[in-house]
Image: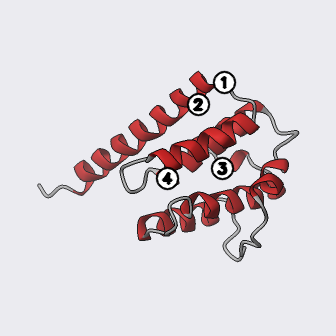
Amino acid sequence: MFLYLLNDNEGKAFMELAIQAMKVNGEEKDCEKAEYETYLTELNLTDYETVGISFEDAVSAFRYSSVPIKRSVIIELCGILYTDKEIDINEMNWIYKLSDTFMLPRKETERLIRWSKDFSDFLEVGLMYINAKE
C-alpha cells in the first residue's frame, strides 16, 4: 500500500526486514508468505531473493530516509506480523526495536501498530462484504 514510496535500495532492504519479521517466532506462516509475495509484487521485485543481511545492515538502508518512509516501513511490517491476527510479545519487541532504530517516538509507533491492525481488520470486513452472496 505504501511501498511505492521506497526507492530500489530501500525496497530490497524492506524485503530483508520482512523475511526477518516472518521469522521472529521461528516459523514462516502461510499467511505471512502470501503477504510477502504481495510486497514483492508491489515493489516490482518479483525476482528478488533475500540475501540474508543482518537487521542492522537492512536498517542502515533507511538512515537517510524521510520520516514518512520510516513510518510506511513500520506500517507495512506490522501488516505482515498481523496477518495471523495477532502481534505477540516477540513481534512487538521486534517492531519496537526497528522503531527505536528509526528514532520514532514510542507513542507514535503504538499508533502505527494500532492503525495497521485496524486497517487490516477493516479490509477483511470490506472483502467479506464484497464477496458476500446476494
Quarter of the image with the C terminus is: bottom left
Distance from label 3 to label 2 (Cα)?
A: 18 Å
Determine crowd level at label 1: few under 14, some 14-19, many 20+ residues with C-alpha closer than 10 A. few
Q: Which mark is residue 81?
A: 4
Q: Residue at x 34, y 43 (%)?
A: 121
The numbered disc on residue 3 is: 3
Q: Looking at this rendering, what residue extends furthest in the right direction?
A: 64
Q: Mark 1 falls on what kind of element?
A: loop
Residue 109: image location, x then y, percent:
59, 30
Q: Is residue 56 left or right of residue 95?
A: right
| Residue, disc 1 | 105
- Asked whether the viewer can see residue 33, the reply is yes
Judging depth in this view, the residue of 26 and 127 nearest the camera is 26
- How far is the residue under mark 1 from the one under mark 3? 21 Å
The kind of residue on which mark 1 rests is: Pro
Q: Which residue is mark 2?
A: 109
Q: Residues within 10 Å of mark 2 (few under 14, many from 20)?
A: some
